[in-house]
Amino acid sequence: MKDQNYYNTFIEVADDCPVTSAEIPSMKDGDKTVPYLQYEMMVKHPYAHTQEDVLFGVFAARHHIPDSELMKEREKLFSKGQPCLRSSSLGKRYGWGIHCDGEGRVALYAMESEEYGKFIRDSSVKHLKAMNSKRLK
């Protein structure tokens, strides 16, 4: 199974992100959405999870996978490619940058924060942009 985590990488907010300061993702009809679940995992436990942990944690929660099936389902999910956090609405729509440390663990930074600005200027980390929502002309 191929490692799908990023290391020493900062995922910047997408060029076409519609907000000027980070927003907490909304819930829909009282249910936690995918971006809300991702946000919750990374904000409550910064640098505790890798990208794969976040992607699988959200998948497991939304599909109500029992604990006894977690390992099998994780292997099954990552046996094929999965969209990475660059495609998350956190960076595309809600204004959050995602830092992946040297061990691949992730944390969120609001686009207006001092920490976000420090990561933008840090040449020791790889810089990627969150994917745009629309094709830019």
Image: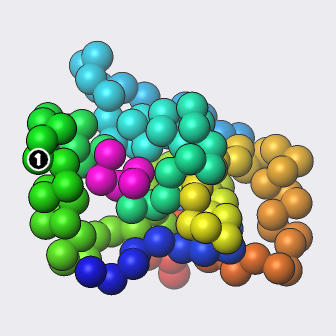
Query: Who is closer to the viewer here, 137 or 24?
Result: 24
Label 1's element? helix
**Start and end of the magenta stretch?**
53-57
The residue lying at 19 percent from left, 77 percent from top is: 80
Question: Mark 1: which amino acid?
Answer: Glu
- Give x and y (percent) for residue 5: 47, 71
Q: Is residue 92 visible?
A: no
Residue lying at the far top in this picture: please name it: 30
The residue lying at 40 percent from left, 68 percent from top is: 84
- Residue that carries the numbered disc 1 in the rendered image: 69
- Answer left or right for 121 relative to 110: right
Identify whether 26 is placed above or below 134: above
Q: Is residue 66 visible?
A: yes
Identify whether 85 is placed above or below 57: below
Q: In which quarter of the image is residue 113?
A: top right
Mark 1, Cα crowd under 10 Å, few <14 / some 14-19 / many 20+, is: few
Query: Who is closer to the viewer here, 117 or 102?
Result: 102
- Give x and y (percent) for residue 30: 28, 16
Name the chief secondary structure element in magenta: helix
- Give x and y (percent) for residue 66: 12, 36
Q: Is residue 60 highlighted in magenta?
A: no
Identify whether 116 is placed above or below 43: below
Query: Who is closer to the viewer here, 3 or 98?
Result: 3
Query: Who is closer to the viewer here, 21 or 87?
Result: 87
- Answer left or right for 52 relative to 129: left
The residue lying at 27 percent from left, 80 percent from top is: 1
- Give x and y (percent) for residue 126: 70, 80
The residue lying at 48 percent from left, 38 percent from top is: 41
- Answer left or right for 46 relative to 125: left
